[in-house]
Amino acid sequence: MPAEFIPTRIQCSIQAVKKVTDGDPVTIDELRRMAAGRFGDMVKAVVDLQRGVLLLDADMHADQEAALLAEGSSPRDLWGINLYPDLRPSFGNRSRGVDDPGTRNAIAALVQRLVRR
């Protein structure tokens, strides 16, 4: 496989997940379709803060984590998150928070960079 090849779908357990990078961002509309197809209002994701990669659309964070680990990610750089494409900040926080403000800000910055409105 040539070095410049970057897959945008990774086989993860029995399903394919979407790999999001700076070169292949995701739109809010894509997130809405993913949410509707699986959980209704939410998309599971795992971020790799070191590599700047986001895996989307799996039943379990563990599947996404395993795929990133197989690609060489370090466990300390991986964070499981839930994205609510139709949730506005004024609606409140519907997911568990990340306690460390630096990590929380890094996750938010990566998601803002990789999700296009």
Image: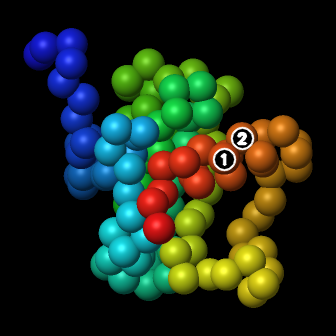
Question: What amino acid is found at the position of numbered circle 1 in the picture?
Answer: Ala
Question: Does residue 10 appear in the picture of this structure?
Answer: yes
The circle on residue 39 is none
Which residue shows up at 38% across the image and 57% down it?
Answer: 26
For residue 39, side relative to residue 74 (left or right): left
For residue 52, side relative to residue 97 (left or right): left
Q: For the residue labelled by badge 2, is the local secondary structure a helix, a strand or a loop?
A: helix
For residue 66, side relative to residue 99 (left or right): left
Q: For the residue labelled by badge 1, is the local secondary structure a helix, a strand or a loop?
A: helix
Closer to us: 11 or 114: 114
Question: What amino acid is found at the position of numbered circle 2 in the picture?
Answer: Ala
Dividing the picture into quadrants, the one containing residue 84 is: bottom right
Which residue shows up at 68% across the image and 52% down it?
Answer: 108
Count residues near mark 2 (Cα–Cα under 10 Å), then give few for <14, some for 14-19, many for 20+: some
Closer to us: 88 or 46: 88
Closer to us: 66 or 2: 2
* Residue 5 versus residue 83 in the image, above or below: above
Q: Quarter of the image containing the N terminus? A: top left
* Residue 99 versus residue 65 in the image, above or below: below
**Mark 1 vs 2: CB contact within 8 A:** yes
Which residue shows up at 46% across the image and 27% down it?
Answer: 69
Q: Position of residue 110 (x, y in %)?
A: 60, 44
Residue on which disc 1 sits: 109
* Residue 46 versus residue 48 in the image, above or below: below
Count residues near mark 1 (Cα–Cα under 10 Å), then give few for <14, some for 14-19, many for 20+: few
Residue on which disc 2 sits: 106
User: For the residues marked 1 and 2, what is the alpha-carbon distance in whole angstroms?
Assistant: 5 Å
The furthest residue to the left = 1
